[in-house]
Amino acid sequence: MSLAGRLAGRANIILLEREELLAMHTTGRSAAVFTETYGNASVRALTSQSRSFFENPPDGFTEQPLFTPRAILFVARPDHVAELNAWLSENPLVSRAATMTEVYDRMPILRRDVFVAAAEEPDSADIDVHGLFEGFRRMAVHGNVEIATSAEVLSVSRAADAWVVESARGTYSARVVVNAGGAWAGRVGVMAGLGDRGLMPLRRTAITIEPPDGVDVSNWLFVNDIGDAFYFKPEAGLVLASPVDETPSEPCDAQPEEIDVATVAWRIEEATTMKVSRIRRKWAGLRTFTPHRTPLFEFDANAPGFFWLAGQGGYGIQTAPSISLHAANKILHYLG
């Protein structure tokens, strides 16, 4: 949708959506955080390039701010201090070390016998994912992009100098086809005879739980175990938590497994004074990665006009402004 918005009015575009509803899968299940320290160096650069868009979106893009500041606190157990120090050295401009006194002053629910070191990313933020998606959708619609839902792609083939896409809503042809199929992107590549580029959907689980009685969590930090045991953050008066799982999955409407729900509940109780007495909601989403964990936004070297926009992994929301701009420029250059 972000690419459609960028190209709107500059090319004739139809967006084919497999589901009846837009943003049904990973986009609608995001943890909604902007962090410039997440991912490899390429991903971090794409995230940083997106910051100005989030802070100052185009006029009329959204009525509400896309950012709500929320610092991220990284905590380390004794056997993960080296990882925390490596993280600090990789992100010197956007991170700082924190004392454990600061940690317990700001997040007193953390158990004092679990963690021994900490660091902070002070300029991270919550993202209004709905506002971001809707802004790009309006850009697309105002630029006469046709959006077809319930239009699962059934085949992709090359005919003369055009691509032919057969969908559940009809058959279309175009000079450029963009494979932005999320967890299904590998399958679309195979349909086109180009392979799946090693794309792998990985399931991640999240839950929301009741905060401690009488505690306002709205100003809590986003707390991330540097050893990837868990993270948690405030979410509409509740606490959102994840076990940071990455379980290989076929493309599907992902559902949480009870073992993963139980794991995150146990880890939260082990690391904090919170009691997970009631789980208000549980869900899962598929985050699709390339083998090198860098998103694909490029034409296929072996197939003129076939553009990969895939493998955004867990970075898709926060990198959408920059990746969509880079992708649009490449496609417009191709179209001449």
Image (cartoon, helix red, strand yellow):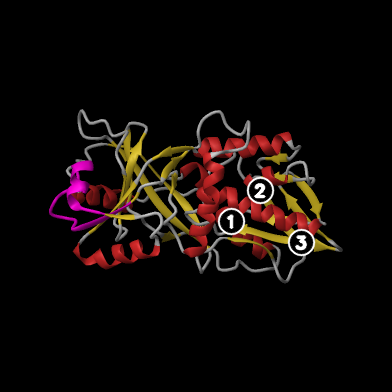
315 to the left or right of 309:
left
* Residue 155 seen in the current view: no
37 or 304: which is nearer to us? 37
Using the image, determine if residue 231 lies above or below residue 308: above
Residue furthest bottom as drawn: 302
Q: Is residue 119 magenta?
A: yes
Residue 218 in the image: state x and y as whole percent: 32, 33
Instruction: Indicate which disc, 3 or 2, sits on the residue closer to the N terminus.
Output: 2
Query: Mark 1: which secondary structure?
Result: helix
* Front disc: 3 or 2: 2
* Three-letter residue code for mark 1: Trp
Instruction: Find disc 3 in the rendering and name its residue.
Output: 305
Identify which residue is drawn at 56% across, 42% down: 23
Q: Which residue is mark 2?
A: 3
Q: Is residue 264 magenta?
A: no
- Counting from the top left corner in percent of width and height, residue 144 is at 76, 37
- Relative placement, left or right, of 255 versus 292 is left
236, 71: nearer the viewer: 71
Residue 69 coordinates in the image, percent (x, y): 40, 39
164 over 2 or under it: above or below: below
Q: Any mark on residue 38, and which?
A: none
Report the mark closest to the observer, 2 or 1: 2
Query: Which three-letter amino acid code belongs to the residue tagged 3?
Result: Gly
Which corner quadrant holds the C terminus?
Answer: bottom right
Separation of marks 3 and 1 at Cα, in angstroms: 19 Å
Q: Which residue is mark 1?
A: 184
Q: Is residue 29 above or below residue 260?
A: above
Q: Residue at x 61, y 34 (%)?
A: 61
Residue furthest out toward the left = 113
Residue 165 x, y percent position in the rendering: 75, 54
Label 1 CA crowd tier, 10 Å (few <14, some 14–19, many 20+): many
Look at the image and give the residue range highlighted in magenta.
98-120
